[in-house]
Amino acid sequence: MAESKIGKKIKELLYLKRMSQSDLARKAGINVQVVSNWITGFRKPKLENLQKLAKALDTTVEDLLTEPKKKSVLTSQEIIVEKMKILEKKLEIKDEEIKNLKERISFLEEELSFYKNKEKLVATSKRTGRD
């Protein structure tokens, strides 16, 4: 079966967002085979699924239903903007990871300090003959 207009649009958005069909299915809460069926034109999505798709692809239902852009029509600026959005999302994740790592390091430093102090106390008590 020939690829549908909505299928072409989904493929275009997947390409721009650097997402796979599996990523989209997971993000939209839809079975990956259903997404594949829409792209191939085997089935057409219902309105509620169009809304899920639009949200998962960070677009609107109207955009999903309009004619897909041809790759040659995408300007360099549009591609750069999309890539910047992707990088911003990756940086957000990295910032959160960095924050978590800093918290773990701080905790471990406190634990290390505690055990160093405990070792000093044990060594002092052994020298003075206290147990």
Image (cartoon, rainbow, N blue to C red):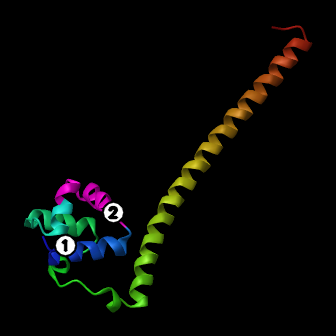
Asked if the stretch drawn in magenta spans residue 49, the answer is: no
Where the N terminus falls, by quadrant? bottom left
Residue at 51% x, 65% y is 91
Q: Quadrant of residue 98?
A: bottom right
Asked if the stretch drawn in magenta spans residue 29, the answer is: yes
Instruction: Report the front residue among 35 and 96.
Output: 35
Above or below: residue 120 compared with residue 55: above
Marks 1 and 2, how far apart at CA:
13 Å
Q: Residue 5: x percent and y percent? A: 15, 78
Above or below: residue 14 compared with residue 103: below
Residue at 78% x, 28% y is 117
Q: Residue 16: x percent and y percent? A: 36, 75
Q: Amino acid at mark 2?
A: Ser
Left or right: 122, with 73 as reference point: right
Above or below: residue 12 compared with residue 34: below
Q: Residue 20: x percent and y percent? A: 33, 63
Under circle 1, the secondary element is: helix
Is residue 82 visible in the rendered image? The answer is: yes
Q: Quadrant of residue 121?
A: top right
Q: Residue furthest right?
A: 127
- Residue at numbered disc 2: 20
Q: Tell me which secondary structure the magenta stretch mostly adopts.
A: helix
Q: Residues within 10 Å of mark 1 (few under 14, many from 20)?
A: many
Q: Amino acid at mark 1?
A: Gly
Q: Earlier in the sequence, mark 1 or mark 2?
A: 1
Magenta part of the protein: which range?
19-34
Q: Residue 34: x percent and y percent? A: 16, 58
Residue at 18% x, 85% y is 67
Q: Residues within 10 Å of mark 2 (few under 14, many from 20)?
A: few
- Residue at numbered disc 1: 7
Instruction: Report the front residue among 99 and 53.
Output: 53
Is residue 30 visible in the rendered image? The answer is: no
